[in-house]
Amino acid sequence: MHPNWQRSTTALTLAAALAAPVAAQVPPPEMKTHVLTDVGPLPAPPTCGCVTDPFKLTPIRPGWGYGGGPASPDTDAVPTTEERRFQRESDRETVQTAQLNSSDGLDGNYNASFGLGLELTSGTAFKRDDEEAAKWFLLSAIGGHPDAQVQAGHRYHRGLGLPQDDAAAAYWFHQAAKSGNIIAMTALGRLYAAGRGVPQDWAVAVSWWRKANNHRLMGDAYACGFGVEQDDQGAAREYQKAVDGGDMTSAIELGHMHAGKCASGASDEAALKWYEKAAQAGYPEAQVALADLYLQGRAQGGPLMAYLWAKLAELRLPAGDLRTSAATHAAAAARRMSPAEIADTNAMVKDLIVTGTSR
């Protein structure tokens, strides 16, 4: 797995990579946690008890450059003129020190080699070059840099600048996981759950998620009874810990558990609380669930609140089952509203979307 290193060709590669179009500092997918831990779908049912989409990876909201709120996107904003200017200045410094950093990297400075891998991935100072980036990441990974080991694992799994090889991916994730890297622990657990590159073993998967304090995945494991004994209360406790850490997808699952009477002391009031927490953070799944709760008369607010949340979700979702469900809920609520109420609520939804997608 050790790359064949030659100083002259590496320096020429860096020089030839100059003059890339500036993309500002929007992080590429390979630097995002939900991408690095995505090793493909896991063999799990679409629902477990009251929860939906167990073990699913979801991009966090808001995306880079956006503020929070009910209409916050999970995509990244277009860089502003000031951000582009700042990036150009940063890139000039990167280019000026590239040769020194490459020499340092080849001489055993694994922070330098890791940094060069990132620069060749971000595609601002240099043109993006996945094969060259993989060489620098591997050099750093062999030297014991945990973040570089994560990159090596990810790139072997995806075949990104390296041959696709799940066994090699598992090896590098394991090296980083032994150092306590949380991303690596999560990804390695998912490889064990899926049986990719390692024997399938849900118990081993759960052991890595527990070490990583990944309460969302632990909640899913308890809800489904995968790798641990099925335990709704254990699932609820794990989801609560995940929400305390800022994971709004776990708030949605807590809402489902209360709405479906799976949680201890389940109540519509608690379901409303958890759905609203995630809905206010911009998660369409929670907004549709909230609309359903209002339509059923299980929360105070009636068709007007149901329409607001369902319409907000409908206008922001791509085509698919969830968007269809949002549209169905919005239509059902609209039949119980006056034209003036619909017009006023539409204006409110429009304002929320404009606010949520502004820089």
Image: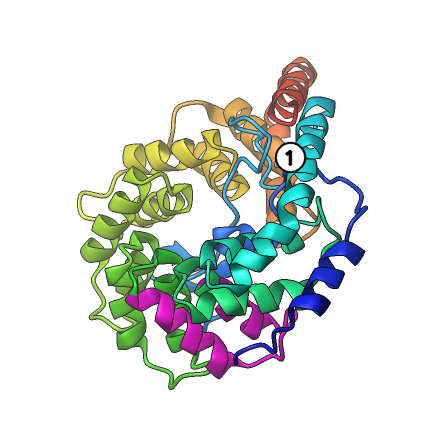
Q: Does the magenta stretch include residue 136?
A: no
Occupied quadrant, residue 81: top right
Outermost residue, bottom direction? 199
Compared across the picture, whether 202 is left or right of 4 comes to: left
Q: Is residue 44 above or below residue 277?
A: below
Percent x, y of residue 275 = 40, 37
Q: Within 10 angstroms of label 1, few (less than 14), some, or many (20 or more) residues?
A: some
The residue to which callout 1 is attached is 90
Percent x, y of residue 97 = 62, 45
Q: Which of 172 and 37 is in front in this view?
A: 172
Q: In this view, does 190 lie above or below 94?
A: below
Q: What stretch is highlighted in magenta?
A: 150-178
Q: Which of 18 and 107 is in front in this view?
A: 107
Query: Of helix, strand and loop, which mostly describes the magenta segment?
Result: helix
Residue placed at 57% from the left, 38% from the top? 63
Q: Quadrant of the C terminus?
A: top right
The number of numbered badges drawn on the structure is 1
Whether residue 351 appears in this view of the structure is: yes
Residue placed at 41% from the left, 31% from the top? 276
Q: Does the magenta stretch include residue 161?
A: yes
Whether residue 40 appears in this view of the structure is: no
Residue placed at 34% from the left, 64% from the top? 185
Q: Nearer the viewer, residue 237 or 303?
A: 237
Percent x, y of residue 178 = 29, 68
Q: Which colour scheme is used?
A: rainbow
Occupied quadrant, residue 187: bottom left
Compared across the picture, whether 187 is left or right of 324 comes to: left
Occupied quadrant, residue 343: top right
Q: What element carries label 1?
A: helix
Percent x, y of residue 263 = 23, 49
